[in-house]
Every structure is written in structure tokens, then in C-alpha cells.
Image (cartoon, rainbow, N blue to C red):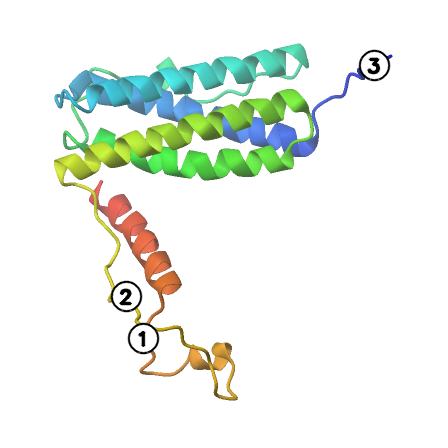
Amino acid sequence: MNIKHSVGLTASEIAALWSAYMSNCMAVCLSKHFLKYLEDEDAKPLVSESLSNFQDHLAEIKDIFTSEKFPIPRGYSEEDLDLSAPSLFFDLFPLSYVYALSRMDSINYSTFVTCAAREDVRTLFTKWSISSLDMFNKSTSLMLSKGIYDRPAFIPYPDHVEFIEKKETLLTQWFEPNRPLNVLELSDIFFILRGIIMQQRY
């Protein structure tokens, strides 16, 4: 006979659900602001879909907290949203926002899955990881079609496999003044710089 034990939320599960709740509260407010002023007909359906996802996430987290008699966090709400305010961003920024947030969410939700033990919490974050990756792929394709996606650097392909033969380790070679950057470093530099540029631009 299978006996199911009622197990409460761990500190890690509460932290993950709380973080997701606060993030989605903010995303709902921003998405509603975007949709009031967004004129691009290709981007509108994607921003609307993301708003629907955020609202669903909030409802699902509330269900878990309510069943656990855990107080619902106080996040951003309609009180923090002024739809009479003028547009704050250029027209295609909402598309960039969906791309950036779906990229972060796919990483965060996957991490949250590995921090959870309860099946319902793991199922929730697994589902959200998949939907975030779907939004990431859709937003990336649309940004590419509109010419606003900044690609990382291209490099010449190597023509052979090369091994380190010197006595020095790879670590010491990092500090050589004329050493070319490797692809891992180029990738990290690109995404870090793009994040900084987006923060300053918008």
C-alpha cells in the first residue's frame, strides 16, 4: 500500500517560489505598459503571450502558498501601474525584454527545479522552464527577422586540433600579453557587455 506523506515546503522551495512570484509580478506590470503603446503587429502577440504566462505563474504560486497556509507575498500590483503615463521605451524594446527575460527565466527555473524535492514544485518549474525556452526561441527568431538581434563574434574555424605542449599550465598562459581570446571568453564578454549596454540604453 502506497502511503503519501504530507511534506511542507523547504526553505529552498519557498525561496524559489518567492523569487518567481516577485519577478512575475514585475513582469505583469511591465507587459501591460508595453501592450498599451506597442505598435509593432509582429511583436504584440508575443508580448501578450508572455503576459498570459506571467499571470498563470502567479496564480499557480498562489495556489501552492494558499494550500500551505503561507502568506501570499506582496509584490508589484495594479497600484504600482500607471497606464496613463507616456510610453517609456522605443517600440521594439518589449520584444527585447521578452527575449532577455525568457533567457534568464529558462536558466533560473531550471536551477529552481534542482533545488526542489516536492514533486508539485518540481513539475511547476519544469513546465515553466520549457515554456521559457519556447518564448526565448520565438523572440530570438523575431528579433533576427527584424534585424535587432546582436550576434556574438564570428571567428575563423581552426584547421587542426592543438594541444598545450609547454610546461606552463593554461592558467599561466591566461596572463600572456599577446594571447588571443578563446571562444569561451569571447562568449562571456559578449553577453556581459550586451547586458550592460541594454541597461544603459533603456
Q: Gap between marks 1 and 2, in whole Å?
A: 14 Å
Residue 186: x and y, percent? 33, 62
**Would residue 111 be seen by someone viewing this image from the given angle?**
yes
**In the image, what residue type sits under mark 1?**
Pro
Q: Say above or below: 77 vs 133.
A: above
Residue 152: x and y, percent? 26, 54
Q: Gap between marks 3 and 2, in whole Å?
A: 57 Å
Quarter of the picture containing the N terminus is: top right
Q: Nearer the viewer, mark 1 or mark 2?
A: 2
Report crowding for label 1: few under 14, some 14 to 19, many 20 or more residues within 10 A (C-alpha).
Answer: few
Quarter of the picture containing the C terminus is: top left
Helix, strand or loop status at disc 3: loop
- N-terminal-most mark, 3 or 2: 3
**Residue at the spot of label 2:** 157
When asked about the image quadrant of residue 40, the answer is: top left
**Would residue 98 be seen by someone viewing this image from the given angle?**
no
Report crowding for label 3: few under 14, some 14 to 19, many 20 or more residues within 10 A (C-alpha).
Answer: few
Question: What residue is shown at x 57% (from left), y 26% (from top)?
Answer: 17
- N-terminal-most mark, 3 or 1: 3
**Residue at the spot of label 3:** 2
Single out the residue that lies furthest toward the bottom.
167
Residue 195: x and y, percent? 31, 48
Contact between labelled residues 1 and 3, with CB atoms less than 8 Å apart: no
Q: Say above or below: 153 vs 112.
A: below
In front: 35, or 163? 163
Q: Nearer the viewer, mark 3 or mark 2?
A: 2
Q: Gap between marks 3 and 1, in whole Å?
A: 60 Å
**Residue at the spot of label 1:** 180
**In the image, what residue type sits under mark 2?**
Tyr
